[in-house]
Image (cartoon, rainbow, N blue to C red):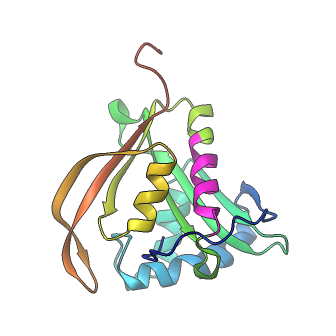
Amino acid sequence: MDYDHRPPLAQLPLPLQIRAMEPGDWPGVWTLLEPVFRAGETFPHDPAISELVARALWVQQSQAIMVALDGDGSVVGSYYLRPNSLCLGAHVANAGYVVAEEQRRRGIGSRLCQHSLQAARQRGFRAMQFNLVVSTNTAGIHCWQRNGFEIVGTLPGAFRHSQLGFVDAHVMVQRLQGAGDS
């Protein structure tokens, strides 16, 4: 997500297909991830991360990896879905998202979020938690809030932003099942 505070572009009915990532999609996903990781503004990964390590983190540690394709078949977004924790905390999902810079503010991040919430429900997760939402990532925070997430805590100085130094990070959560659900 970016820091752009302008209102979203007109919500055009973008032809967007969201499907499971196939091996041939990785180069397109890496094209999206690399500049975001290198920027050091939203993901906690080493800005010098190698493509091999990035692929292992994005793909191999996830239950589902999805891509969003535009009308031309180009990868314009991706998300992963995985348990947030081990064993006794594995009923809570975690997800990470990336959208092509030139496609931001068009609702793609929101559509990926909605898709991931549905996928998490289908897999039986009881909630979804984002552990480290950088406080300066206002576009991301607003997107997640519009999609039902709430900030349940703030971690002072928890993120070392490449430009701003130590900034706060939020923990955001959305319940996917009611308290009485088993």
- Measuring from the top left, give residue 134's x and y in whole percent: 31, 65
From this view, report whether residue 181 is shown above or below residue 20: above
Residue at point 62% right, 32% down?
122
- Residue pictured at 28% horizontal, 84% vertical: 162
Percent x, y of residue 63: 56, 47
Does residue 39 sit above or below 42 in this rendering?
below
Q: Residue 175: name its quadrant.
A: top left
The reply to whether residue 67 is in sight is yes
Task: Count numbered badges in the picture.
Answer: 0
Q: Which residues are magenta?
A: 106-117
Please name the predominant secondary structure of the magenta segment in the image: helix
Q: Give the residue displayed 40% in from the left and 59% down from the top.
A: 141
**Which x, y percent locates residue 55?**
53, 70
- Horizontal side of 130 relative to 125 (left or right) equals left
Q: Quadrant of residue 138?
A: bottom left
Magenta stretch encompasses residue 116 = yes
Point 51% across, 77% down: residue: 52
Q: Is residue 98 magenta?
A: no
Nearest the viewer among 38 and 5 is 5
Determine the residue located farthest toward the right in the rendered image: 72
| Residue 117 point in image, percent of width and height | 56, 42
- Camera sees residue 95: no
Is 127 situated above or below 130? above
181 relative to 162 in the view: left or right: right
Vertical placement of 140 versus 4: above or below?
above
Residue sitting at the far left: 156
